[in-house]
Amino acid sequence: MTDIFDAGLILSSFAGGLLAAAIGALPAFILGGVFIVLGVCIVLAGGSADFLNFLGIGPFFGPHIAWASAVAATAYAGKKELLESGLDIKVPLIKLNDPFVLVVGGIFGVAAYFISSVLAQLNFPANPIATAVFVNLVIARLVFGKSGLFGKPEDKKQVWPAKDALLLNILLGLSIGMATSYITKTTGNVLLGFGISAVILFYLQMGFEVPVTHHVSFTAALATLTTGNIYIGAVAGGIAIVIGEIITNLFVKDGDTLIDPWAGTIMVTSFLLYFWPRF
């Protein structure tokens, strides 16, 4: 595992986490999506994967470095009452004029780098980036949150998705899954749909209530490449959106920091798909 102790990668991860905290968690994730789409286009055009590997999914703007670190820094700012809520992931934290908030982002960036690298070295049977995001934000909840791991519901904890939204969510998941599965089958690339879904969140940052779908896109793409079947990919997308709702109800609803339900979904679905040939 000596490769993971590369000083340049460690410092880049710290810098990526700090910068992401400065510009805000959601803006950082969106920018990472832009880099993923550009990087995939470069690869599909026959170019090098270096742009994608370093900027899109690597130690600068990879979701585990930029997004999760900025969310953790937001949780810290919420604990210090510098923000109204530790869930304010749209806020650029540079406006708080507190260097320690940004340093927290850098520290969690390094932690995410090591978590994902060790998991990759160990061939952990789930996506190492998504797992690093989820683990990092569980840690942030336990360290900076006051609501406990599962939040503090006023009434009985609701885990299963609400019936009035279940059909709509499944329809959305199947549709996004089908579209993503087709482009994945055509291009052979697992990240294109994920990147597009991330870029769409630009409208969420602007205040429009667009759905979060990158967990659906990635699951559908991975299922398509694993099975070779776009219809299984579409069904996997429908399943992923339900899993995402369940994880949201478990960890986000009634909580005071964000534990990423979308990364949690990818962690679960990639784990299940890892064992697909054994079924």
Image: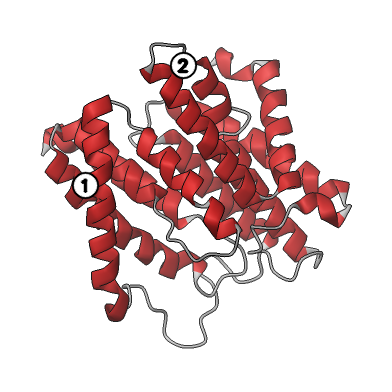
Horizontal side, residue 199 vs residue 238: left or right:
right
Picture quadrant where residue 115 is located: top right
Horizontal side, residue 193 vs residue 104: left or right:
left
Q: Amino acid at mark 2?
A: Ala
Q: Secondary structure at mark 2?
A: loop
Horizontal side, residue 2 vs residue 81: left or right:
left
* Residue appearing at x 68%, y 33% in the figure: 16
Density class for disc 2 (Cα within 10 Å; few <14, some 14-19, many ≥20) is some
Query: Quadrant location of the C terminus?
Result: top left
* Residue appearing at x 42%, y 79% in the figure: 157
**Outermost residue toward the bottom in this view:** 155
Q: Amino acid at mark 1?
A: Met
Where residue 272 appears, x then y in whole percent?
25, 43
Marking on residue 178? 1
**Front-most of 135 and 243?**
243
Q: Is residue 80 above or below residue 36?
A: below
* Residue appearing at x 54%, y 31% in the figure: 35
Residue tagged by mark 2? 49
Q: Secondary structure at mark 1?
A: helix
Where residue 80 appears, x then y in whole percent?
81, 63
- Mark 2 vs mark 1: in front: 1
Query: Residues at badges 2 and 1 in contact (C-beta under 8 Å)?
Result: no
Q: Is residue 116 above or below residue 212?
A: above
